[in-house]
Amino acid sequence: MEKFIPLLKSPKIFNGETMVLVYHNMDILVVKENRHSRLPDYNLISSYYDLSIMPIALGIMDGVYYSAIHVDNRNDIPVGTEFMKVRHLYKISNENLFYLAGFGHQIADWDRSFRFCGKCGANTVNHPDERAKLCPNCGHVIYPKISPAVICSVTRGDEILLARGSKFSKPVYSVLAGFVEPGETLEETVKREIMEETSITVKNIKYFGNQPWPFSSSMMMAFTADYASGEIKIDNKEIIDAAWYKAANLPLLPTSHSIAHRLIMNFVDK
Ligand SMILES: [Zn+2]
């Protein structure tokens, strides 16, 4: 996120605007408007919710201080508001705000998941110096979890390997991805995931870029690779269809703010 200054506490003196992002699980509260929903302003949130229990500090972006709360009851909300999926917020916000709301979701979810120490069961407190939970009883420190994942485009001449995941609600076809397992190098994860999901072997694995993806607290690390050998054979668990596609004949693709889309466009532009 450009121009984002993360904060562990609310600023003591701040003359700018304040926003409180309200989350319920994977959803964020927005004000319903005819054409475009928007994030609710501070007055609406502070008149409805008890903010005396300190909201979680996120940081300052474009002169606005952002904090977050998580509510357990998704039906007890101000008139004119509704919850929408945080990962759909890109439809009504700019890219920076989309990432900030994703970061807020990740931190709010982590905050409520680690109220107790996993080692001794005592109540945790916020670490005074860093984004972490501290157990005052045994000294255990808990940082926000980030799960490394790889995503890789596989090309064969003028074709790209695209697959439809079983969890996709729409018939979207994308490049293959998967989580890194303990002890693996990133290249080993790329080879294993592609082999497990499509029975294809790859070579010439090259780093492409990365994207924090807060909706599963993951860090997507993107690669490109060339086809080496094998015939497509899908696992029918994570992948329900896979095929080679030419640039002129692509299926429905992931949304443009994803690194998967950037990988596919990198193939198209060649
Ligand atoms: Zn403890």
Image (cartoon, rainbow, N blue to C red):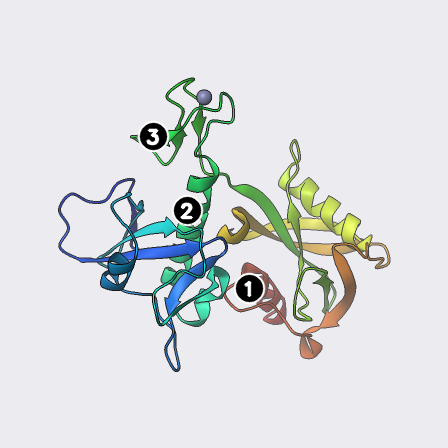
* Observer-nearest of 142 and 113: 113
Q: Is residue 209 left or right of residue 13?
A: right
Element on which disc 1 rests: helix
Residue 260 on image: x %, y %: 59, 61
Read off the residue under disc 1.
262
Residue 2 shows in the view: no
Q: Is residue 256 left or right of residue 49?
A: right
Mark 2 Cβ and ligand 1 under 8 Å apart = no
Read off the residue under disc 2.
108
The quarter of the displayed image where residue 226 is located: bottom right
Residue 104 on image: x %, y %: 39, 51
- The residue lying at 66 percent from left, 35 percent from top is 184
**Amino acid type, callout 2:** Ala
Q: Is residue 100 above or below residue 121?
A: below
In this view, the residue farthest toward the bottom is 34
Q: CA distance from mark 2 to mark 1?
A: 29 Å
Q: CA distance from mark 3 to mark 2?
A: 15 Å
**Amino acid type, callout 1:** Arg
| Nearer to us: label 3 or label 2 | 2
Read off the residue under disc 3.
127
The quarter of the displayed image where residue 100 is located: bottom left
- Counting every numbered tag in the picture gives 3
**Sequence-wise first label, 2 or 1:** 2
**Sequence-wise first label, 1 or 3:** 3
In which quadrant will I find the N terminus?
bottom left
Residue 101 on image: x %, y %: 40, 57
* Observer-nearest of 18 and 209: 18
